[in-house]
Image (cartoon, rainbow, N blue to C red):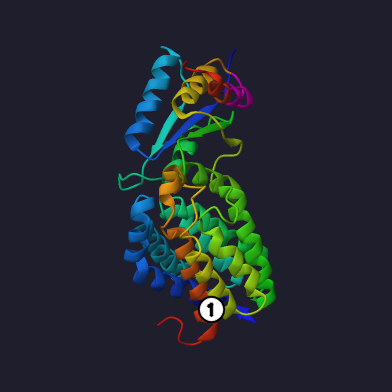
Amino acid sequence: MLDADFFRRWMTAAAASVEREAERLTALDSPIGDADHGSNLRRGFAAVVAVLEKDAPDTPGAVLVLAGRQLISTVGGASGPLYGTLLRRTGKALGDAAEVSEGQLADALRAGVDAVMTLGGAAPGDKTMIDALVPAVDALGESFAAARSAAEEGALATTPLQARKGRASYLGERSIGHQDPGATSAALLIAALAGTAGHPEAADA
Amino acid sequence: MPDEKLVGIVLVSHSAAVAASVAELAKGLAGAGADVPVAPAGGTEDGGLGTSAELISAAAASVDRGAGVAVLTDLGSAVLTVKALLAEGDELPRNTRLVDAPFVEGAVAAVVTASTGADLAAVAAAASEAYAYRKE
């Protein structure tokens, strides 16, 4: 079973990963975006870690709702409301339980991904974070490791796609040949989840 | 029309200068004496280009007179942030609505319509109808 501490460690691991990869995310965002994805997410997840330490929510759902709300408040780009909605809706789907099963997390995360698709209007194949998140959620029923692989493959598979949502869509065919920064950061978030599940004590490192 | 409450208007742009200028333009074109509460919410809190949930929430609270708040946005994160705040439930005044409208033309239509004492539905409809104004 997964408790509030597991979800706090997931967010801490995600913040560390975004911090490590911020320059790469911004570099990916330079040719087809506005070159702020790494810095925006770094600011957002640092704020998430700070507020989780301060408020110390005591259920898995409350951790994710607070984290999502914080992302919406602090990111300043489209990834804020999108990731914020993902975490907040996932947290709401987890309800008030003190511990949740992996199956419950998989179901809740699917509700979160559905909410992101509704908010942004993106579908699989549009060259967005959805291209990493949907395969990850599909594979989560199998294992955390499978979800990580599926998300990473999904992110890589955005390279030949033409963007149909977001700023990159204005570039038309010129968006082809670039890996999508949003799908890349989504894969980092799922990898942080798998890392937290795989290393129960050491995930903060 | 005594004691009528006017609909408030919030203008959300990636740029603080654009939001403030469109607010000034819309109020100017609405004419003297129009007392519509209009608030810009442009850029990020540190003055950069982007969207700030805090500035949007503060702007909406500042124009809420009890008749509802119409929010107009430019694009991208401005649209998504307002939608995410509306989904939250308690971040924006009750009866706040994201209006599907062109930013500049919609803002003028919204402020002029609100100045007549029209309700939120009428203000939103007038702003959306600005899409139908063709230029050739």
What's the magenta bit mostly, secondary-structure-wise? helix
**Residue at image location 51% in from the left, 80% down from the top:** A196
Element on which disc 1 rests: helix
Image quadrant in which you'd find residue A98: bottom right
Quick one: quadrant of the N terminus of chain B? top right
Residue A95 appears anywhere in the view = no
Mark 1 nearby-residue class (10 Å; few <14, some 14–19, many ≥20): many
> At which x and y percent is residue A185?
45, 64
> What range of the chain is rendered magenta?
B118-126
> At which x and y percent is residue A92?
64, 61
Q: Chain of mark 1?
A: A
On screen, residue B62 above or below B53: above
In this rendering, position of residue B136 left or right of residue B2: left
**Residue at image location 58% in from the left, 27% down from the top:** B124
Magenta highlight on residue A163: no
> At which x and y percent is residue A35?
33, 54
- The kind of residue tagged 1 is Ala
Q: Between residues A73 and A134, which one lies in front from this camera angle?
A: A134
